[in-house]
Image (tube, helix red, strand yellow):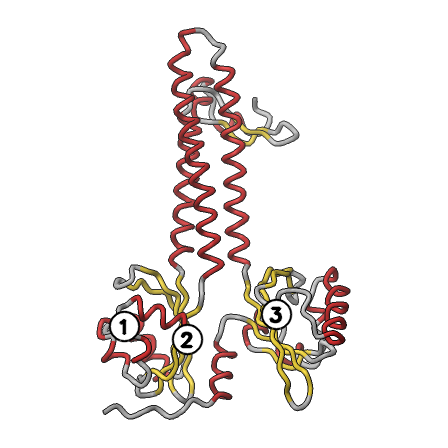
């Protein structure tokens, strides 16, 4: 019969989670004075805990938010009514170097030593915003190319019968580009949905490698591996998941516990066919693993590169001369057919070469 593990110390558990999570956690009082921050918050704001604690939260916001924050805080303290959502609010915060960083904030409130305390969990969504911007730029570029090709088709229809074959090729290229544009929009929607829904799976093990805690996201991963998460608390991971023996996960978690060192790596899990980003954090009671599914990010980057190469190849294959220019007429690109037809080299045609 397996011996039951000792009960978790809530204080120790909160400390491990707060110090190890990649999300920034900040607590403030009713005057918006910072009471505590975790290491992730120090990294997000580019300031040490000593620089943040005891000072107003306001300088960490862009100036455009100052008045609204003050009004909202005063209104909530007087009425107790939430006028905005307290979950996944998208704003920007200020780094010490002046950069604005896009984040999602979730708020909470509790009482401590007879006073009201507010907590905020900040998630850096810079990668998501950059991905959305890149996808939007690709969509805009594709739309412009499709419009340009449609115009070329209309002009080609007025040319003599000897160009009919060329018109047909242009039509085929236009259809292909339109399909690619639709795929890019669909890809953008899928990638955005995946990025917004990625959770961290958290598992805690004692020094005997027995599970002492699983969050819902970790339970979902284990269920996908064919295990019943409700039966795993108190059991040894290597006995319940022997397929992990000999993997990077085993070597890194053992190294983290033996050396009392935080480890961070990515690994492909064949049983699920997914890439995971793992952060292993040791403590006096064992180790805590933080796992994030990063399959979508890898696939999105590969697909964007493939689409860009495909669009460039399509533009070079159309049977007409094509180029792009800035608002001032400065030409920054010619297709391959231009060089073949004119007999010029890229170095001759740069800028105002035309």
Secondary element at image label 3: loop
**Could you say which disc has been placed on residue 46 in the image?**
3
Point out the frontmost of discs 1 and 3.
1
Residue depth check, mark 3 versus mark 2: number of the one nearer the observer: 2
**Tag 2 or tag 3, which sits nearer the N-term?**
3
Provide the secondary structure element on which disc 1 rests: loop
* Residue ID at (72%, 69%): 59
For image coordinates 61% across by 68% down, the residue present is 86
- Residue to which mark 1 is pinned: 227
- In front: 338, or 288? 288
Horizontal side of residue 263 vs 49, given as left or right: left
Tell me the CA gap for discs 1 and 3.
Answer: 41 Å
Can you give x and y, in whole percent of width and height, for residue 271 in the image? Answer: 26, 64
238 vs 170: above or below: below
Q: Position of residue 263 (x, y in %)?
A: 40, 74
Compared with residue 177, is residue 51 higher up or lower down, i.e. above or below?
A: below
Count neighbours of disc 2 (C-alpha within 10 A) and say few if under 14, some if 14 to 19, many if 20 or more. few
Determine whether 313 is above or below 68 in the image. above
Q: Which residue is mark 2?
A: 215
Alpha carbon separation for disc pair 2 and 1: 15 Å
Question: At which x and y percent is residue 78?
Answer: 76, 75
Tag 3–tag 2 contact (CB < 8 Å): no
**Separation (CA) of disc 3 from disc 2:** 30 Å
Residue found at x 42% / y 22%: 171
């Amino acid at each position: 019969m397996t011996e039951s593990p000792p009960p978790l110390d809530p204080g120790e558990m909160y400390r491990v989670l707060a110090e190890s999570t990649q999300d920034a956690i900040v607590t403030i009082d009713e005057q918006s004075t910072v009471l505590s921050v975790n290491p992730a918050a120090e990294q997000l704001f580019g300031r040490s805990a000593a620089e943040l604690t005891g000072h107003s939260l306001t300088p960490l916001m862009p100036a455009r938010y100052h008045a609204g924050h003050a009004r909202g805080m005063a209104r909530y303290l007087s009425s107790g009514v939430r006028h905005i959502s307290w979950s996944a609010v998208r704003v920007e915060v200020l780094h010490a170097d002046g950069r604005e960083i896009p984040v999602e904030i979730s708020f909470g409130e509790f009482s401590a030593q007879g006073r009201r305390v507010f907590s905020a969990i900040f998630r850096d969504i810079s990668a998501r915003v950059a991905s959305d911007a890149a996808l939007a730029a690709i969509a805009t570029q594709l739309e412009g190319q499709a419009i340009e090709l449609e115009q070329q088709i209309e002009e080609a229809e007025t040319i003599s019968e000897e160009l009919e074959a060329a018109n047909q090729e242009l039509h085929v290229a236009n259809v292909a580009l339109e399909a690619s544009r639709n795929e890019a929009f669909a890809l953008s929607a899928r990638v955005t949905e995946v990025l917004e829904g990625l959770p961290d799976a958290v598992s805690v093990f004692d020094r005997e490698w027995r599970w002492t805690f699983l969050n819902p996201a970790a339970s979902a991963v284990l269920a996908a591996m064919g295990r019943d998460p409700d039966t795993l608390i108190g059991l040894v991971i290597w006995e319940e998941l022997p397929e992990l023996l000999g993997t990077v996960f085993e070597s890194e978690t053992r190294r983290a516990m033996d050396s009392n060192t935080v480890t961070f790596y990515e690994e492909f899990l064949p049983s699920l066919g997914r890439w995971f980003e793992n952060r292993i954090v040791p403590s006096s009671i064992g180790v805590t693993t933080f796992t994030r599914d990063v399959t979508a990010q890898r696939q999105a980057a590969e697909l964007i590169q493939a689409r860009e190469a495909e669009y460039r190849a399509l533009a070079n294959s159309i049977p007409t001369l094509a180029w792009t220019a800035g608002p001032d007429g400065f030409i920054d690109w010619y297709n391959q057919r231009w060089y073949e037809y004119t007999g010029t080299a890229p170095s001759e045609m740069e800028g105002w070469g035309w």
